[in-house]
Image (cartoon, coloured by chain):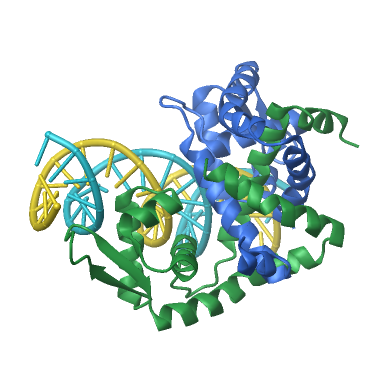
Chain colours: A blue, B green, C yellow, D cyan
Amino acid sequence: MTPTLERAARTDAGLASELRVSVMRLRRRLAAEREPGNELSVGALSVLGVLFRNGECTVGQLADHERVRPPSMTRTVNCLVDAGFVVRRSDEHDKRQVHISISDQGLQTLLADRRRRDAWLAQRLRELTPQQRAVLREAAPIIERLAST
Amino acid sequence: MTPTLERAARTDAGLASELRVSVMRLRRRLAAEREPGNELSVGALSVLGVLFRNGECTVGQLADHERVRPPSMTRTVNCLVDAGFVVRRSDEHDKRQVHISISDQGLQTLLADRRRRDAWLAQRLRELTPQQRAVLREAAPIIERLAST
DNA sequence: TATTGTTATACTCTATAACTATA
DNA sequence: TATAGTTATAGAGTATAACAATA
């Protein structure tokens, strides 16, 4: 069908190119799925997820985990604090550090919001074959690993 | 190892969540790989790729293909025209339409730039096992399809 | 001096709304 | 009236540089 693309994908560079473009497009599509009036950005939701899974983190740890610069994470955390979804706590021993943890309200919002945000993608996934879903199930952690290198 | 996550990924909603976050992170990591002084944005490169593969397109077709709004595509095309990488051509029959095609300079830049841009990801891919690369080779077109639904 | 986080500022990419020209 | 594209403007998310507080 598309011999040039298929051949290209067999090389590392061709696969890199294909994967890069497809990831770019899906991310853009996902970002466009935000519902009107939704106060949580994609990045903020991701931070809530980290706090939920890993527990309390410092701003620096969150920045490293999300692969953004500290000022960007400060801004995201400010939004979450203003919304009452996380709480700041100063470290007793090293007063430079600020610990962030998810609040009850943040947890409830995370779960509800995640369900809502994932609805679009989950519906698209349901339209795939079980084999295709199995491929993505294997691919997701590999992509995650690529991103965290 | 991570029983909660693995269990979650077996449901469509869990897979959606995992895939969404990993795609977000990889995209951000890729965007950060832009070399200093590089005049081509990720979106502009993608447009050059479309023109290379599909030949001449209208602005509207490019906007649809890249899933952006017409004004965004106009801006991207303007950058490419200014750089001499594409050329505009008015339709003879319907003067509202503008056809865009890649120039020789654009093609050379596309190929060189793609090699350079993919270098980081290709290196990461080389660090994977052949099995993992095979999974990604299967996953890329599925992800592309998810994005274009 | 080095580290942690914040503030100030600017850049990139995208969107919506309003507009022009053409059909 | 409807369509293709552009211009004007705004918003979201990110970055770098400079700064404050603490170690």
Residue A89: image quadrant is top right
Res. A55 in view: no
Please report the residue visible at 73 percent of the width from the left and 67 percent of the height from the top: A10
Residue at the front extreme?
A1
Q: Is residue B74 visible?
A: yes
Q: In this rendered view, identify the residue nearer to me: A102 or A21.
A: A21
User: In the picture, residue A116 is in which quadrant?
Assistant: top right
Q: Position of residue A15 (x, y in %)?
A: 68, 64
Residue A43 placement, left or right of A8: left
- Of residues C23 and D20, the one nearer the viewer is C23
Q: Position of residue A51 (x, y in %)?
A: 70, 31
A19 versus A38 height, above or below: below
> Closest to the observer: A80 or A2?
A2
Relative to D14, does residue B77 appear above or below in the rendering? Answer: below
Task: Name which residue lies at 78% across and 39% down.
Answer: A134
The residue at 37%/68% (across/down) is: B56
Q: Is residue A60 shown above or below B114?
A: above
Would residue B60 appear left or right of A11 to someone viewing this image?
left
How many callouts does the rendering have? 0
Pick out the residue farthest to the right: B1
**Near-viewer residue (B61 or C17):** B61
Q: Residue at x 45, y 68 (%)?
A: B48
Residue B50 percent location from the top left of the image: 47, 64
At which x and y percent is residue A103? 64, 20
Q: In which quadrant of the rendered image does the N terminus of chain B lie?
A: top right
